[in-house]
């Protein structure tokens, strides 16, 4: 087992469960760094789309990922802005085409190996909140706090529909539900790092909870494990 350089809270779960927002708020409350692992895969997906690469060619996708120049800029209350090769791609990372491609390239073992050390490098004092799909099972298996945040596919589709409508983007519930179901299947059935709770993870179903309630539960679990604001494990 590898000793962590700082306490890590992992938040894994399917698309639309709210893990990104929860991770950001928990990180802000604790004063910890934030790792949006999904952004790394979406960045890789965006590189594939822009270079016209074959998403099934693991070596080619990993090579594109190795060449990426990435920068994250946290904006209090506004989320995290992401830069790729000097360009702000925060919005491009959130469109449906990029998300769908990210789910496809995330199955590639070559890409996952390429990004593994990058992700582990985020674990530094005073601590880290890492959100993704295999943070607790593969990237940080020794994390003292592991959360598996989920919600029903129906609820996640409804949340996504609301987000898109607020942005003025036309969408319909049946197609979003189908997309989420297909993405869940791909993520759960892939051979490399499938989406599943770590054996010692605490599962939280957010279907009937709001973000504040989920964050409170995560913070309470963290405190029970000795993680508090401004404090790291001895």
Image (tube, helix red, strand yellow):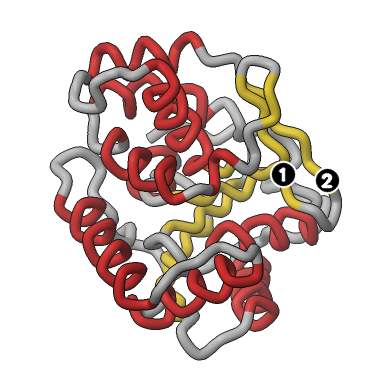
- Quarter of the figure that contains the C terminus: top right
Residue 203 visible within the image:
no
Q: Residue furthest bottom?
A: 208
Which type of secondary structure does the marked residue at label 1 adopt? strand
**Residue 176 as seen in the image, left or right of residue 94:** left
Instruction: Point out residue 161 in the picture as x, y percentages from the top left corner.
Output: 49, 73
Give how far apart the Cα atoms at labels 2 and 1 are: 6 Å
Residue located at (36% from left, 62% from top): 200
Instruction: Point out residue 36 in the picture as x, y percentages from the top left corner.
Output: 56, 44
Between disc 2 and disc 1, whose residue precedes?
2
Does the residue at mark 2 contact the one at mark 1 (Cβ under 8 Å)?
yes
Pick whichever, 152 or 121, lies toward us: 152
Considering only vertical position in the picture, is 81 above or below 66?
below
Pick whichever, 217 or 25, lies toward us: 25
Q: Looking at the rendered structure, which numbered label has been put on residue 80?
A: 1
- Quarter of the figure that contains the N terminus: top left
Residue matched to label 2: 75
Q: Choose top left, top right, bottom left or bottom right for residue 29.
A: bottom right
């Amino acid at each position: 087992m590898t000793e962590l350089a700082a306490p890590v809270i992992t938040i894994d779960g399917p698309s639309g469960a709210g893990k990104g927002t929860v991770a950001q708020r928990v990180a802000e409350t604790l004063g910890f760094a934030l790792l949006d692992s999904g952004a790394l895969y979406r960045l890789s997906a965006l590189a594939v789309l822009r270079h016209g690469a074959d998403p099934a060619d693991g070596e080619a996708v990993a090579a594109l990922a190795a060449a990426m120049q990435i920068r994250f800029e946290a904006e209090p209350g506004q989320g995290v802005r992401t830069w790729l090769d000097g360009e702000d791609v925060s919005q491009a990372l959130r469109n449906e085409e990029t998300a769908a491609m990210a789910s496809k390239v995330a199955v590639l073992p070559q890409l996952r190996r390429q990004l593994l050390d990058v992700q582990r490098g985020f674990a530094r004092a005073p601590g880290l909140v890492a959100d993704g799909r295999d943070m607790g099972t593969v990237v940080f298996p020794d994390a003292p706090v592991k959360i598996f945040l989920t919600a029903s596919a129906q609820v996640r589709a409804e949340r996504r529909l609301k987000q898109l409508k607020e942005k003025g983007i036309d969408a319909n519930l049946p197609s979003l539900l189908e997309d989420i179901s297909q993405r869940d299947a791909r993520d759960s059935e892939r051979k490399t790092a499938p989406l599943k709770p770590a054996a010692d993870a605490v599962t939280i179903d957010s279907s009937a909870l709001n973000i504040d309630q989920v964050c409170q539960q995560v913070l309470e679990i963290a405190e029970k494990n000795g993680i508090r604001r401004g404090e790291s494990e001895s």
